[in-house]
Structures are given as structure tokens and as C-alpha cells.
Image (cartoon, helix red, strand yellow):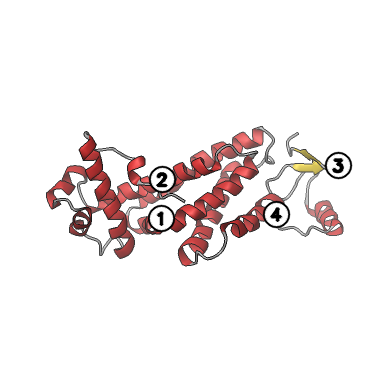
Amino acid sequence: MNQVSIYKVDSAGAKTARGKITRTKLLEAAVKEFGEKGFHAASISGITRAANVALGTFYVYFDSKEAIFRALVEYMGHLTRAFIAEHIGSPVNRLDAERKGLQAFIEFVRVHKDLYRIVMEAQFVADDAFRKYYLDFAEGYVRNLSAAAARHEISSGNQEVRAWALMGMCSFLGLRYAIWDDTRSPEEIVAAMSDLTEHGMAPRSTKMTLNTRTKNQKPGKKHGMGAHRRNGKTRSADA
């Protein structure tokens, strides 16, 4: 998997090609500085040394250590969304997009562990940037789920709650299987997650499923986000 450069996503604050290159060097040096040391122990001088630029040059592009930290949080969001969109490509349907998206996310975090740590620390350093990071994700997620429901690719439901639930699961799966331990196969993780989102946690034996549906479910309801199946054919929850 190719590592995505911040330079491909951002060029704000730089008016010339040389300026863009310098700003990129500062950002990528900051990823390492903040990722390894954390916000409070990191220093502007450490960033400029790693970027091999003069200390005064830093202030041409950023006002402070907090400013470049905030920039990294924002660009982490841009990088992640761009990487996932590229690897999802043209999915068969929304459930296929969910599977491909989770695998791409796990792979992305394994390569960009420092950036992931920066986002996690942002909740204590720059809470507004931290919130925006997730709110931007959620906005697009809700839009995509709603469109998929309209196309009968997933069941109807509260797509905002679903978006945040899926984001939460992905975030902790990234923490567990990309940051803490990256030895598990992404395909294995995706299979387990997909089984949950597509089929739910209810017992699957015919007897138990019928009893559960009779006692607890309204007609037409189904566990998971998948469309209903009747006589071997897919049927939408809102059809």
C-alpha cells in the first residue's frame, strides 16, 4: 500500500511551488514530532530541524505549535477520506462499500499510526478540531447511508445514529488492530464486522429467529442493515 502524502491533499498558505514544498516538509516533520513525543513535549525547533528549514521560516506558514497541530488534525481527515474513497472505488452496493471502506481504514491507520495518535490527542489539546474531524466524517457518512437506503441497498432507519455507531466501531477497530496490534489480517476483521452489520447479533436458528421476531419485532423489521430476503431474493425494508 502506498503511503499518502499530506502534500497531495493540502497546499493552503503557500503561494509558490517552493512554498508548497516547504510547508509540506514542515507538516510531515510535525507528524513525526507530535506522533512520537505528544503535543506538550514536541517543539517547533524539533519540527524545523526535522524539516531542515530555518526556525523563522516556520512562522511564514504557521502562527504557533498549536496551529500546525490543528492543521494536522484537519489534514488527517482529508487524507483518510481520500484514501478510503480511492480504495472503495465503484462498489457493488453500500454493504460492499462498508466492507471495502473498513479494510482501507485499517490499512491506512497501520501506515499512518502517528497521524492517528495525533487525532486521539486532539480531544485534549484542540477539542474543536477534534469534534470537526468526526463531524465532517459523519456528515458524509449520513449522506451516503441515506442515499443507499433510497436505492434500497440497505434497510431504512436512523442513518445518523447508524453513521456514528459505524464510525465508533471503525475507530476502536483501528485502535485495537492497527495501533495496538497489526498482526491480524484486515480481511478477518472485515469479515467479523460485516457479519455484525449485515446480520446482527440475534440467534440465527429458524426456531429462535421466528420466536424473537414474533415477540419483539414488528412485521418487516430485520436485524442488521442488509435488505430483506424473501424466497431467495433481496427485498428492501422500505419496499
Q: Amino acid at mark 4?
A: Gly
Marks 2 and 1: CB-CB under 8 Å?
A: yes
Labels 1 and 3: the sequence-earlier one: 1
Circle 4/circle 1 CB separation < 8 Å: no
Q: Position of residue 215 (x, y in %)?
A: 82, 54
What whole-number distance in Å separates the C-alpha atoms at marks 3 and 4? 20 Å
The answer to whether marks 2 and 3 mark residues whose Cβ atoms lie closer than 8 Å is no
**Residue 200: assigned label:** 4
Q: Residues within 10 Å of mark 3 (few under 14, many from 20)?
A: few
Look at 63% across and 36% down and name the residue there. Answer: 148
Horizontal side of residue 80 vs 30, given as left or right = right
Residue at mark 1 to residue at mark 3: CA–CA distance = 45 Å
> Sequence-wise, which precedes: disc 2 or disc 4?
2
Instruction: Return the residue at label 1.
Output: 112
Q: Helix, strand, or loop for circle 3?
A: loop
Depth order, front residue of 152/213: 152
Q: Which mark is residue 79?
A: 2
Residue at screen point 28% across, 37% down: 12
Give the residue type that dot 1 points to: His
Left or right for 198, reference 117: right
Numbered tag placed on residue 231 in the rendering: 3
